[in-house]
Amino acid sequence: MSTLAVPPFLTNARQDAIDLYKAFKGFGCDSAAVINILAHRDATQRAVIQQEYKAMYSDELTNRLSSELSGQLKKAMLLWILDPAGRDATVLREALCGNVVDLYAATEVICSRTPSQIQTIKQIYHAKFGVYLEHDIHYQASGDHQKLLLAYIGTVRYEGHEVDPHMVSKDAKDLFKAGEKRLGTDEKTFIRIFSERSRAQLAAVASYYDHTYGNKLEKAVKGETSGLFEFALLTILRCAENPAKYFAKVLRKAMKGLGTNDTALVRVVVTRTEIDMQYIKAEYHKKYKKHLHDAIHSETSGHYRTFLLSLVGSHA
């Protein structure tokens, strides 16, 4: 579900390209004009604008944005200009092979995406970087965390809402036996069920587990696992139950306390705007009694703030 304030009429990509070129000309860049155009165009429109810009000025729009903008605004805009799968692939590559390897960011992206999104991301990752996503995960991650990520991106899961009740009770029982019921943990069972079940099925397993064993599956995961493996399992589970609530929590964490985790803030706002931002805003307000718009406003400034708020949209 898109929350973009995309104009109700067909915009003129050629005119947008001309206006962007004008914004770059002269001394300093008219960042407000750049934001005004690009923050209000959807993925298809942005792709056409880039084609027009290249045809007219023999230059990549991304190169120009990269040299004209700076700081967090530049990072956010260079991600935004991409299509959703290209953006995820870029975030993953940066998290797995950048100056600072961020396995938490890579895990968040992988474990919160649907099977069809993951298939597209894998194709683009290989086309763009000349290496398979599996290869980079294999190289950077280790142990059960690595096994889970590889199983998760290698399995094509069902995306519908149908649930198999017989399998639900069996999975819940298997997880109980693999974790709380025994000394130590049988990680293989957790990896198998969490990587092979659809979101609807896993949510049903969690609910059944809760009612049958008097303990939340989430709590069992926390008690039985740790580190990145625990983080990956929890991300899969929470996104099976309520992805918008999960991302509201990630945003809250990015803005809580002293200083802001801008990398996480940019990643979530830019990658979720065209997917489920309306729901994330509603969950954020419900849980923290504050509008996401206001939280971002108080944590950011300048053109960077203007851009993020343009993507997030108003309080509605």
Image: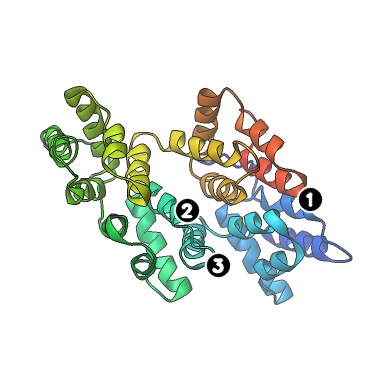
Instruction: Classify residue 98 as left or right of residue 78.
Output: left
- Of mark 3 and mark 1, the one earlier in the sequence is 1
Distance of label 3 from label 2 (alpha carbons): 14 Å
Q: Residue at x 26, y 33 (%)?
A: 217
Badge 1 element: helix
Question: The residue under label 2 is which amino acid type?
Answer: Ala
- Of mark 3 and mark 2, the one earlier in the sequence is 3
Q: Which label number is shown at residue 99?
A: 3
Res. 161 in view: no
Residue position for label 2: 105
Residue position for label 1: 32
Are the residues at dot 2 and dot 1 in contact (C-beta closer than 8 Å)?
A: no
Front-lying residue, 206 or 102: 102
Placement of the C terminus among the 4 image quadrants: top right
Residue 301 in the image: state x and y as whole percent: 75, 43
Q: Residues within 10 Å of mark 2 (few under 14, many from 20)?
A: some
Residue 59 in the image: state x and y as whole percent: 69, 75
Residue 37 in the image: state x and y as whole percent: 72, 52
Front-lying residue, 162 or 132: 132
Indicate the quadrant where residue 255 lies: top right
Q: Which residue lies furthest to the front in this view?
A: 183
Question: The residue under label 3 is which amino acid type?
Answer: Asn
Res. 175 in view: yes
Does 135 sit above or below residue 295? Answer: below
Q: Which label number is shown at residue 189?
A: none
Q: Which residue is drawn at 46% across and 58% down?
A: 85
Distance of label 2 from label 1 (alpha carbons): 29 Å
